[in-house]
Image: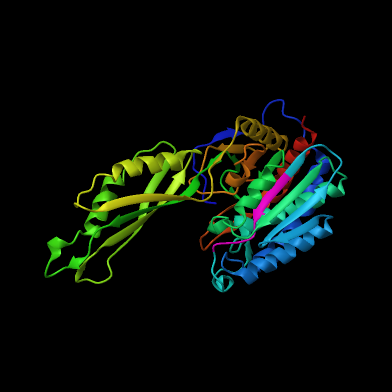
Amino acid sequence: MKKLILAVVLGGAMHGAMAADQGLLEAARAQQAPLLATLKELVLIESGSSDTAGVARVADVSALRLKALGAVVERKDGIVTGRFTGKGSKRLMLIAHMDTVYQPGILVSQPYHVDGNRVYGPGIADDKSGIALILHTIEMLHARGWRDYAQLTVIFNPDEEVGSRASGEWIATQAAQHDFVFSCEPNGAQMEGILLSASGIATATMTVQGRAAHAGVAPKVGRNALIELSHQLLETQDINVPGAQLNWTRANAGLVTNQIPASATAQGDVRLSTADGAQRLQQALSEKVAKPLVADTVTTVAIEQGRPPFIATDAARAWAVKAQAIYGEIDRKLALYPGTGGGTDAGYASRAGKAIVLEAFGLAGDGVHGNDEYITIDSIVPRLYLLSRMMQEAGASQ
């Protein structure tokens, strides 16, 4: 998931805030050192999305830890799913991802290391912090005898950084069977918060069909697909469609230099902020490209949808305010981030519209996808406290 946009609504300690659960807070403090040890173990396993062996090793560690906590664990298509049966009535789900954006060998140039309040390492924030936080939150709550849920499901997926194409449907179908989903992507180190929306992601492909001809002898006989593609890219570059943002990013035409190109293609990055954004964009583009510059050329546009957008419901927004109040119990402020241009698995989790879905319960950090990714040690206890209290509140809700 990409960085959150800066506009925030602040919350936190306030007059009349409830007192902290001191026993839970002490339990969170006791989990700090073990969580750091888990985090180090995970970071020292390189697990870029294309590194199937590395991701499988993270899955091995995660599955063993879930089993040790009492979960029934299923592994399918690289996805680790753990299920706990409780004594309550609500069905809760926690999600995080095991893959990173980094290539094999990254630990040589970006080693795990501690510098004051920061712990550095590739993927340490995004999203190995989420895995560690989930494991230790469950350990902490179960040790205190909390089982106020009908079912608690944990999903660790292997392909979030490449669109969750193998795991997205699994996350969506499982979330549709739950009442609450807490997604544990990382937080910003400067201001911790809860994310209320994230873009859906799609790919637009423009294809132009023209006619080939000898570029030197008979260029006018041809119908230059490259020229038409260039025209249509300029015509559509600023297309304004509510709920969709398009940026053309790649193009290709022709096979040899002495032939008028008979075909040309371009691809664009599409970000969606509404459920029908892709359909609106498809219609607008199709209408726009129907008017050619080069006679006898035909231009078509297709949009392939990937991760759906995440848009917090009114109920989820109310629970985000509850999260602010919980952080106020320990005298900390929590931002409500309106949105981000990056994608998140919360989009799949919220697709059915059944569960209350909230995002960004992971540890605070920064530098994600870069050469200085880190988490802050002083965020561990507060984030453990926040997630565990939210789970308690969700389990007790009517």
Looking at the rendered image, the quarter that the C terminus falls into is top right
Residue at left 60%, top 64%? 121
- Snapshot quadrant of residue 346: top right
- Snapshot quadrant of residue 241: top left
Specify whether residue 39 is painted magenta. Answer: no
Which residue is more in the foreground, 259 or 201? 259
Q: Residue 226 placed where, x, y %?
A: 24, 59
Residue at left 23%, top 61%? 211
Q: In this figure, which colouring scheme has been used for the structure?
A: rainbow
Q: Residue 85 placed where, x, y %?
A: 84, 47
Which residue is more in the foreground, 62 or 208? 208
| Range covered by the magenta-colored residues | 93-101
Which residue is more in the foreground, 139 or 85? 85
**Residue 161 seen by the camera:** yes
209 to the left or right of 381: left
Q: Residue 291 placed where, x, y %?
A: 24, 44
96 to the left or right of 218: right
The residue sitting at the top extreme is: 16
